[in-house]
Each structure stands twice: as structure tokens, then as C-alpha cells.
Image: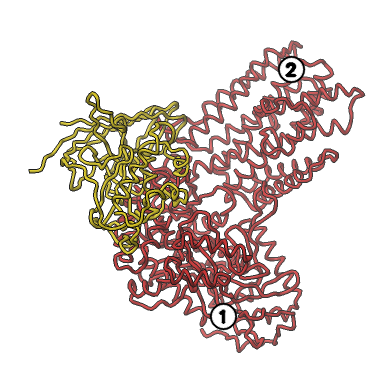
Amino acid sequence: MTKEVCYQIRHLTAYEYTGRIDLCQSIAHLKPLIDGSQKTIEHSVEVHPKPHFQTEREDYWNNGTLYFEVQGSHQSLKVIATSKVVKRITDPVVPRSGAAWDDVSARLKMGDSDEKGLYFANFLLPTLSCPRLEEIDEFLEPSLQPGRDSMELVSEIMTRINTEFDYVPGATDTTTPVVTLLKNKQGVCQDFAHVMIVALRRLGIPVRYVSGYLETLPPPGVEKLQGSDATHAWVEAYSRATGWVGFDPTNNIIPAHQHIKIGHGRDYFDLQPLKGTFVGNGNQRLTVEVDVERC
Amino acid sequence: MSGTTYSDSTVSPVSMASFGYAPLPNRRDEAFDSNGKIVPEWEGLFESIGRHGIDILDEWDSVATRISRERGLAYRPASVEAETDAGWSLDPLPWLISSEKWKPLESGICQRTRLYQALLKDAYGEQRMLSEKLIPAEILLANNGFVRSLHNLTPGDERVGLGMSAFDIARDTVGNPFVVNDRFDSPFGLGLALENRTVINKVLPRLFRRCGVEQIGQFFIDWFKFLVSRAPGGKVDPLVVILDPSTQNEDSEISFLANYCGVLRVHPADLTVRGGEVWIKTLKGLVPVDVIWKLMPGKRIDALESEIRGGGGISGIFEVMRMGRVSLASHPGSEVLQSPGFYPYLPKLCRAFLGEELELAPVATWWCGTSKALSHVTANLSKMVIKSVGHHHDFQTQYGSRLSAGDLEKLRERIHAHPEGFVGQEELRISTVPTVRAEGVVPRGAVLRAFSFPDEEKGAVVMPGGLARVSSADGTVVSTRSEGESKDVWISTGRLPDGFSIASVLERSHPAVPDIVPSQKGENLFWSGRYAERAHAASRFASRVLSCRDQGFSNDDQFEVAHEDFLLEALFVVFDSDKLLGDEKDLDKRLEMVLVDPNCPAGIAYNLNRFHYATQATRESWSPASIRAIESAGQLWRKVARDIDPDLSVSSDLFELQLKLSGFLGLNLDSMTRDEGWALLDAGRRIERGKIITSLLIFLLEGKFDEDMKSLLNESVLFILDSARTYQRRYQDTPQTAFTVQLLLSEVDYPRSIRHIIDRLVDVCEKIPNPSQHAHPRALLATASKDLTLLNERIDMEIEAGIFLDSELLVEMRKLRDFFINLSDQITVSYFSHTVES
């Protein structure tokens, strides 16, 4: 019998506006996906003020996608996602692909696809926020011993991002380019994920951005894991032998049952938890609260 | 009815030599064969030239220029701010193509439309092209025109389809046609083609008839039917709009298309998504839209889902598409198919998707993503055209033949760094067509842009004709989107048409544009009126300052300087921009700000620019004469700004500008339909005028001036408001504040009195509909009108009794000024911004 753990997740996003907003359209990626290691058994999203219109669908990456409109003057917007997710308990193991990173013949081809039929080209090619950067070569260089197992290399890159970059909330925002991250060596989880994506794509290893939650256990004496106050982000890399495997450069761990996955894409912008446009005046102030509890 | 054929016509042989035409060596000419003999379908044209003599070309050229200028549509000069008058020009000589030569082209275009329609459906659906490895995956997936959020929209649905498509076709030295570009997303040039046809048909009506040129009117009728047929759920009588990304002049061919096809032209800001539908914000409220003929890049069209941040567009429109409640033509993801990366694989794709051999070959193309192609391209770089396959945002097509050895090396390095991002194409030596230049008729390289759209029965409908773009003197590169030289394209049957005139086709072809005024258009008309009035007032101020300097009306320099100082300060106060003056005390500098500073809201240049933008955005509302007035005002002031010299007076330029602006303000009254758009324009200018007059009166009442200064400032105010003569007639006295106030507040039939302005506003606003959510301005106006009557009675009494008090009147005058501001605010909220109360 496989062991399981059940999580109750509450994810609040609140915008306070200084002026009046008359119309807002939003897209939310808040529904944890279902895969071999996790099952979403309950999920609901509450929006205040109540949307005049909403629809749900799956996007290109099979992520649950909610669209809603709020009409009429409002000064705040609250989105509360509640999910119950069952995760299989696993032990994190550093995987091996059985192929050397520099073995060109073992490389995955653009036109090949994963088990879900998504072409690797999606995860090998540059995007607007994860462009092709020569600047990454200098960072990669010390790890590129010939003949190394490719997944072992990926794991080392994760560790090096974790040790060489500082976790500094507020030092960056969602538009900070990777080239700046490489220079300043600081950021938050999504920045580290983007750096890792740029690095692995440079090596021809398919990699995708993962958005999700992280359970934090703060017993006395144990260092508190970062990422507990907000949504979390990490990456998944692919090899034929392993399929998609998670890597969390923020915490230098292989994600297991404490990482609850919402979905994946090429980079942050493919699955922002909440994005929207509004008509009206004023600036906005954002608050995010995430609670992940066992149930 | 059998027609006349070329061989029957009485051609007096015209040789190339007779008018000095010399085709280029090593290039094929469309009009003359290699022996210098005229190609049959061109005979009529040259016979005509021969008959009239070579000088007829100058006449044709000037007639074509005059007609297109008068039409004022496609060939307009660039904005006021631009240094030069760029734009499109039209060559009077058409490109003649015989029916026999056209037939295979038409068939090839038709097949290509069917092929790309199939590719589009596949790219956004099943993706056989990837699963069967018909193309390298990066050709599709690395292209920034591939809109992932539209994948699997509704497979097989008609909404996943091409709309108006364009194919650029060139012929090589042996006459084989090649496609050099495909445009599906929002091809430009359709309006230019239509405009060219209309103009050339007027220049060469008889020749047009003799050549039996195929009409293009039916193509537009069919296109409109196609758009109507896209309506979700087969809705009868759907609302079709044309979406123009720019409210400015760059794409003014769109407003021509809109008028011609009877389709309402809207801009992204006119549309809003609410409740799973797309709506137009109109003066009457929200109106649902069914079909959008979009002329903006599809990947930018949904501000919410666009990968390009801050790209504008209409939030939520993809969601409405997913629900099948709006149709967009073309499919917003069709840009991906424009990639030349498909070219090497096109024959294979054609066999796979259509089971046919490709009829119309693309120009020879190598995708650098394969090592073989890469080495071929880099080894032959100087003979190649290098294009991006859609990965880069910053790569301009490069012509190897034009690059220095150093630049070739740089390009080679760039390709090597990212080979899969590029293709190399053979540089064609494209064929030439005779083109009129000052020195005579000369050969110029030409590319034909053909237009088509899908059709369920025929596969595609192809326009019999198109837009020809002509190269610059030296070579093979034809013009870009924003400027260049074009030609009409005649598909010549050689038979006389059976009594079918183009005029009748043009007349009867299309429905009238729906009677809907989008809010933004209303707002732009409103502001056209306001900015014209502001520019006029600012120029009157400047005229006053200059004429005082010229005349030297007193012997007291200090007095004159003080007067000028007061005036300029007043001008900045009137336009709420006195903060801008800051520490600038130098009067010459202040005057220069007023004259030419494009960032000074109290200045002429600023207001003329704004005026120009607002009128450009509403171009289809204006008569050609109004457009002429607007443009010549802009041209005049551009020249003044360029040549400004402190030592030279601009008095006469100012006077000319005032004439042009008055001309505009008068013309629009006579030539515009008196609908709600006109009402808003008229309301805008009257509100602005009311605000300027009350502001000036406040200035007179408020200021602490001595008697001489007061009298002079009164004179200045009357001059600025062009009211000196009327004052003289009525009072026959030196200017004094009481009379100035009385005249400008009470004179009933005088357009520069507040009485008249408010009376007219009452009338004009009755033409504006009742807004669905907010109050009509009539209540506000009624109160103001009553208050004004009382105020005028009081002023009359006070003057009579000799107890006229500036300070008390000042309070009333401020209230009156606030009324104009409030009225403007109310019109904005009720008609333009459409915000819903919750």
C-alpha cells in the first residue's frame, strides 16, 4: 500500500486599489493538476466582488485555467483558491539519466515529444523571459566535466544556483531579466527557476517551469524552508530514462510529497497564478497569503 | 458578345526607341520581349502614348496625383511632427497582365490559399505537420507568431481560418513566377489596390475599357459576404467591424476600405469584452459585435493573453472566441504561417495536405537549422537574402549583395550563433515594368501583391488584379509598408466589356456603414473641435504680441513690455499651464514656446499636433476639403517651426494659419452630415471657445492694472477674440471692461458671445442621444442658460446705473467658466468612458 498525505491549501490573492476600478478581466492558474504523484480531490475559487462572468478550461499545457470578469466599480479584488490534494509519499532521490550531457546522439530532439505528446521544442527553445544567453556559459563552465551523467549535472546546477545566489525578496520583480539575475546573483524562487531554465536549455536539456505550493514544517531547531509565505516555483527536467524530474533550486532539493504542483509551462508567464487587466484609475497593492496544512 | 482582340486594333507600332525606353540588361521586362517587341497586352497602352505623344505621361501623372490628393485617402503626408511628407505615390502606368498569363497565377494563388488554410487548421489542431515530421518542430514552435493559447480552439470550426491573405509574387529572368512573401495575419495594401484602381480608372477610362480590364468590385462584394458568413451561429445581418490598430494616419487605407465595404471602422479602445461577448462602446451605449475584420497583429489582439506585455488590444477576446461568440478574420494565430521557414517544406506539405503538386513555387529557400543548408547559405552569403523565421524581434531582412565584406562576416557569425532562426533565399533578379519618372519612362523592378480569401466551393476567391510595388532606382527591393511607389494591376481580357461600368459596380456594391458612432470617435471629434479652437486662440495671442511689437503704440518701452508680459501670462493661465512658465522670464523665449514648442499646451505647435491626431483618427468623417485644410495647416506650421528665426516675423504665417483654421471650422459646418458626431465636434469647439472667453474675462476682472493698461488689455482681449470691430460698431468708444464683458456675454447673434455659445450648445446637444447610464447634458445647459439671462440683466442694469463692480462679477464669471468645464466632464462620462455604476 502506498503511503499518502492529504493537504488542505488556502491561497488568497488580494488587490487593493487606490482609485476606482470599473472593469477587470483576469486569468487564474490556481488548480493543482492531477498526475502520478498527486490527486486534486477538491478545488474551488471564490472571487470578491462576485464576477459577472466566468469560464473554466484547460490550456495548452493542460493547466486548469479560470477566466473571470468583474464589472462595476470596486476598490479591491480578492481571489481565494481552496484545494484539497492527496500526495503520494516518496523519498527524494537524485536521478540518473544514464547518458552523458555531452553525448550529442543521446540528446532529445525538438520534434520528439513527452508522454503527454508535448514536443520538446517547447522546452528547449528560448522564450521572452528565458532567452538564449551567452552570459550563462561562464556560470555553467565549472560543472561541465565531459562524460558526466546529464541528470547529475542538472542536480549540480540546482545546488550551485542555491549556493551562489541569495534569496532576497523584493530584490527583483517578475520582469527582471535573467541577465540581470546572473549579474546580481539574487532573487526569489521564480528567478532561480528562470536561471536554471536558461542554463539547461543552453545545454540542450528539456526543462519546464513549475508553479505550485510548498509545505513548510518549522519544528524548533530546523531551518524554515523558504517559499512558505507565497506560491512556490521550481523546474522539471527531462531525460528518456527518468521522464520529467523536479528540481527545486531555491531549497536545493528534489521535490517530493511536500511540493504540490499547480502546473507547468515554458516560464513564469505561461502560468502566472493570477493575471489581469483593469479599466480605471489608481495604483494597486498586492497581498498574497498561502496556507498549506495537512488534513 | 465577341470582343475586339489586340490583333484587330489599329496599332501604330511604337518602338522602345521612340520614347527612349531601355530595359535593363540581364533583367526580364514585362512589356517588351528580348527582341524589343511590345508584349501584346501592353500594345493598347503604348499605342495610346504614341498617339498622344510622350508628353501625355506628364499629364497622366499630374492627373493621377491630383485625383489622389483630392480623394485625400491613401497618399497622405505623414504627421505634423514628421520632417518630410512621406507616403505612397501612384505611378500612372498600370502593370498589364493578359488573361492567359493570369490564369496559372490565379490557380496557383487559389491552391496556395487552400494549402495555408489546411496548414492553419493543422497548426492549431492536430499538428500532423509535427507528428508526421513534415517540418522541423522549431519552424512552428519557436515562432513567436504561434499563439499557444489558441491551440485546440475548436478543431475544424470555421472560426479557425484564414481571412484576407496576400501573396507577393515576382518573376525571374526567364519569366517564372515565385512567391517571395505570404501575409495572412493583417496584410496591408488591399485599400491601396482599391484606391489605385479608382484613381487610374479616372485617369485612363477609355484605355481601361479598350483593354477589357477585369473588374475588382465583385471581389469586395464577395469578401463582404464572406465576412457576413463568418457570423457566429449563422446570425442574419450581423454587425461586422474593421479593427484598425492605429488611430493615426499610417493605415489610412483602412478607413478607405471601411467606407468602401460599408464596414464600421473601430479601434481596440472602442471594443470591450463583457459577459462573454465583444461590444462596441458607442454614443448610445454598448452594441454587440459579431465579426471582426482585424488589421492588427493577432498575437497582440488580446491584452490579457498576449505574451507581449503592454501590447494593447482587447482583454478577454480570445475567451469570447473560445465560446464561439465572435469571429475574427484572419485567425489571430495566422502570423506563424508567414514564416519563410515553411518554404523548403512546402512541396511536401502540399502533397501531404492537398494530395497535389505545388503550382506556385516559393523562392528557393534554405532553412539554416540543417547543417547542409547552413553551409550552403553561409558559403553563398553574398548572393542570399537572409530573413528571420520569426524568432527574433530585431532582425531586419538583409541582402548579401549589398553588404560589405565586414558586414557579411558579422551576418555569418550571427547565423552561426543561432542557425535555426534564419533562412537564406536566393536573391531574384525580378522583372521590370515601365514606370514614369521625371526623365521619362524607365524600367523598375516590380512585385505583385495578390489578394485572396478562402471559399468553401471554389477553394478560394482571388482578386483579379492586385497591388504592384515598384523598386527604387537601383535594384530589386520593393517598398515597405509605410511608403513607396505602387501601380494598378490590370488583368486584360482584350475584349470589350459588356456594358458594365466600374462606377456602377462601385456604387451598388455595398451597404452603407452602419449608423453607429463609436465613443472614441465621438471623443476625437469633440477634441478636434477643442484643439482647433485652442490653436486658433493661441495664434491670435501670438499675433497680438507681434503686432504690438511692430506698431509700437506708445513711447514707453516699459509699458509695452509689461503689457506683453501680462498677455503671455494670461495665455498660459487660459490653458491651465502657467506652471510651465516656471523661471522663464525672457519674453522672446516665452513667445517661442507659444509658437513652436511641441510640449507647451498653451502653444500653437502642441495644439496643432493634437488637432492633427484627433482629426486623423476620425478621417472618414471629414470632407476632402476639410482634410486639405487640416493638412495645409500642419504643413505650414511644420515649415514655420523648422525655419524659426528670432529676427524674422511670423506675423503673416500666423495670419495664414488663422485663415486655414477658420476655413476648417467653417468647412466642417457645411460639409458634414449633422449627426451626433458633428454635434460633438461643434459642442467641443463651442465649449472650448466659451472656456477661453470666460477665462479672458476673468483675467480682465481679476488683474490689478492701472487705467491705461486696463484699456490696452481690453483692446488686446478684443483683438484676440477677433471682436474689436464688433465692439467699435456697438460702443464707438475706447475699450473698457464693462462693455467688453457686456458684449462677450450678451450679444445674441454674435458667435463670440457666451449667450450665442450657450444657445447653440442647447440646440447642438439635442442631436446627441440620451446615454444609457448617465444624464444627458441638457439639464446642465438649461440651468446655465437661465443663469446667464439673469446675469446679463444684472450687468445691463449695473452699466445703466454706473455701478459696475469688477469684484462681484468675478464670482459669476468663475461660475460660468466652471460650467464649461463641468459640461465637458459630463459629456466625457456619459458618452466616452462608459463606466458602469455598481
**Residue B646 appears in which quarter of the rendering?**
top right
Given the image, what chain letter belongs to the residue carrying mark 2?
B
Q: Name the residue under label 1.
A: B496
Q: Indicate the amino acid at tag 1.
A: Leu
Where is residue B650 drawn, in percent x and y? 81, 40
How far separated are the C-alphas under marks 2 and 1? Answer: 78 Å
User: Residue at point 26% right, 34% down?
Assistant: A81
**Residue B489 appears in which quarter of the rendering?**
bottom right
Image label count: 2
User: Residue at point 57% right, 47% down?
Assistant: B618
Quadrant where the C terminus of chain B lies? top left
Q: Pick the residue in front: B154 or B514.
A: B154
Q: Mark 2 points at which residue?
A: B703
Q: In the rendered image, what is the letter of the chain coloured red?
A: B
Residue mark closest to the camera, 2 vs 1: 2
Q: Pick the residue in front: B791 or A190.
A: A190
Q: Mark 1 and mark 2 in contact (Cβ < 8 Å)?
A: no
Q: Indicate the amino acid at tag 2.
A: Gly
Given the image, what chain letter belongs to the residue carrying mark 1?
B
Q: Is residue B191 left or right of B594 when viewed as pictured? A: left
**Would you say residue B237 is visible in this rendering?**
no
Earlier-in-chain disc, 2 versus 1: 1
Marker disc for residue B690:
none
Q: Is residue B397 left or right of A194 when viewed as pictured? A: right
User: Residue at point 43% right, 55% down?
Assistant: B144
What is the crowding at mark 1: few (fewer than 14 residues within 10 Å), some, or many (at least 20)?
some
Where is residue B796 drawn, in percent x and y? 71, 17
**Residue B40 appears in which quarter of the rendering?**
bottom right
What is the crowding at mark 2: few (fewer than 14 residues within 10 Å), some, or many (at least 20)?
few
